[in-house]
Image (cartoon, grey):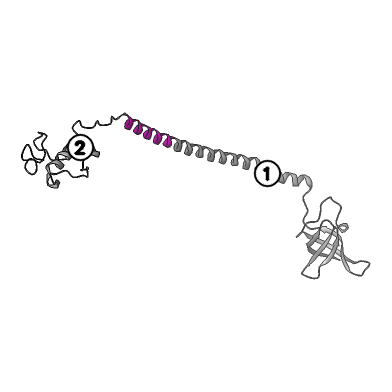
Amino acid sequence: MRFEGTLTKWNDERGFGFITPIPAGQEIFVHVSAFARDGQRPQLQEALSFEITLNKDGKKQAVAVHRDRPVPSASVARERRRPETSEEPRALSSRIVVFLIAFVLLAAAYWQYDRRSQRAMAVKAEAAAQALDQPTPAPSATAQPLASSPFRCDGRQHCSQMTSCSEAKFFLQSCPGVKMDGNGDGVPCEQQWCTHPLAK
């Protein structure tokens, strides 16, 4: 009597496994020698039909096992694998294209960065050159040495901020931006401090 079942366990190295009968029941031991010698190894979840006999220990085992679903031959298996192998070159070429695109984008970004850096360096160099080209203003011939004067340029510009004619004269001669000589005659603060030619 033949039974049907599914190969649920298989040890390919030792050449045996177990079949679960349909409907479900106790697993039946099966040896590789019970399969037809067609060059195909048993596969898990494979639908099988088989007969049952008792081995020398009195335990059930499957014999005369047939595959209910024919397993493809080696040539058919190779034909089925061909599309997969043909996919490999496509996958490789797509990876190469992605790599090239990424490389081009990185190169363009680096080029832009390098160009901006060079522009910034050129602007700095030009500014430094212009600073070197500007002549240093010569000190006024009438300016008094700072070391010999008790006064210092401290940002004051108007006569109302002075305390004496001498201080006003010092600021007019030595400090830039002062507004103490309205008529431009070289005498500062004529209405406040330097009203007399001999005023000090």
Numbered disc in front, either 1 or 2: 2
Image quadrant holding the N terminus, namely bottom right
Residue positioned 54% across, 38% down in the render: 103
Compare residues 67 and 82 and report the one nearer the observer. Answer: 82
Displayed quadrant of residue 159: top left
Could you tell whether 175 is left or right of 130 in the image?
left
Q: Earlier in the sequence, mark 1 or mark 2?
A: 1
Q: Amino acid at mark 2?
A: Ser
Q: Residue at x 45, y 38 (%)?
A: 113
What is the crowding at mark 1: few (fewer than 14 residues within 10 Å), some, or many (at least 20)? few
Amino acid type of the residue tagged 1 in the rendering: Pro
For the point 28% across and 31% down, which residue is it?
Answer: 136
Q: CA distance from mark 1 to mark 2?
A: 93 Å
Q: Is residue 4 left or right of residue 158?
A: right
**Residue that mark 2 sits on:** 174
Can residue 192 be found in the magenta stretch?
no
Q: Which residue is mark 1?
A: 83
Q: Residue at x 17, y 36 (%)?
A: 173
Q: In the picture provided, is 200 more to the left or to the right than 3?
A: left
Q: Residue 56: x and y, percent?
A: 94, 67
| Viewer-proximal residue among 58 and 93 | 93
Helix, strand or loop under label 2 = helix
Question: Magenta residues?
Answer: 115-132
Quadrant assignment, res 6 = bottom right
Q: Secondary structure at mark 1?
A: helix
Label 2 Cα crowd, 10 Å radius (few <14 / some 14-19 / many 20+): many
Tell me: residue 126, above or below residue 83. Answer: above
